[in-house]
Amino acid sequence: MSDYLLDEHGLNPGKIYRLFTGSICPRPIAWVSTLDGRGNANLAPFSFFNVVSVAPPVLGFSPLLNGEGRPKDTILNLGAVPECVVHIGGEGLIGALNATSASVAHGEDEFALAGLEKAAMPGVSVPRVAEAPVAFGCRLREIIRFGDQPLAGNLVLAEVVSIHIDDAIWNGRHVDIAGLHPVGRMAGSDYARTTDRFELERPA
């Protein structure tokens, strides 16, 4: 067993990243589309993601700065067009989702790179992935920046203003998990399925 006081042991960001991603898992994946100031679409996955509020409905995801301390296109685009669409891709789209994680030149369209169709999303100017079963159209509420060093996070708080959901997986009350086939992010190149589940009743 080991204990680490970070001020004393000085674990570097790379080691902390590997510890976080290896132990805080599985993590849901936000598949986020944005637009730059010229109208070029960007699409990228982020596994530092979750719900942060229901009333108002707010999602949070955190694009890290890259290894050189530069922001990713998603952050740059949100500065130009403060809207995004957050998708839940499901296992059927995992190949396309993975393709959009590639490092490409700013302004290159990841929709085209991954062979995906665009569709209009109500309430925002940013397109959604037509094939995605769940999408949340969002307006930017805030970006909390945690520094300018490599791997520093940018916590994006995005308020949901519209929802697209496939009627085949939503009955107005429950989402059909078997139909959605959600996946979670693990460490390295690993992903997790949700096909093995169990139930526990919450205490009164």
Image: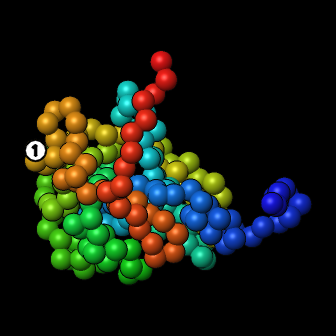
Residue at image point 47% right, 58% down? 26
In this view, which residue lies farthest toward the right? 8
What residue is shown at x 62% (from left), y 69% (from top)? 18
Residue 116 rendering spot, x and y as whole percentages: 17, 71
- Measured as percent of width and height from the top left, residue 126 is found at 24, 55
Residue 70 at what x, y percent from top left?
56, 71
Q: How many marks?
A: 1
Give the residue number, with chain letter if any, for mark 1.
Answer: 167
Query: Amino acid under label 1?
Result: Asp
Q: Quadrant of residue 51?
A: top left
Picture layout, residue 35 above or below residue 116: above
Which image quadrant for residue 56? top left
Q: In the image, 168: left or right of 134? A: left
Can residue 21 be seen here? The reply is yes
Q: In the rendered view, would you say 184 is above or below 60?
A: below
Identify which residue is drawn at 44% across, 47% down.
50
The coloring applied to the image is rainbow
Q: Position of residue 107 (x, y in %)?
A: 32, 75
Residue under the image location 41 percent in, 68 percent down: 191
Describe residue 21's horizontal placement relative to residue 117 as left or right: right
Direction from residue 64 to residue 3 in the image, left or right: right
| Image quadrant occupied by the N terminus | bottom right
Q: Residue furthest left?
A: 167
Instruction: Decide: few, some or many residues near mark 1? Use Cα within 10 Å; few <14, some 14-19, many ≥20.
Output: few
Q: In this rendering, does residue 76 appear at all?
A: no
60 displayed left or right of 93: right
Q: Nearer the viewer, residue 7 or 143?
A: 7
| Residue ranking furthest to the top | 204
In this rendered view, identify the residue nearer to me: 192 or 145: 192
Mark 1 residue element: helix
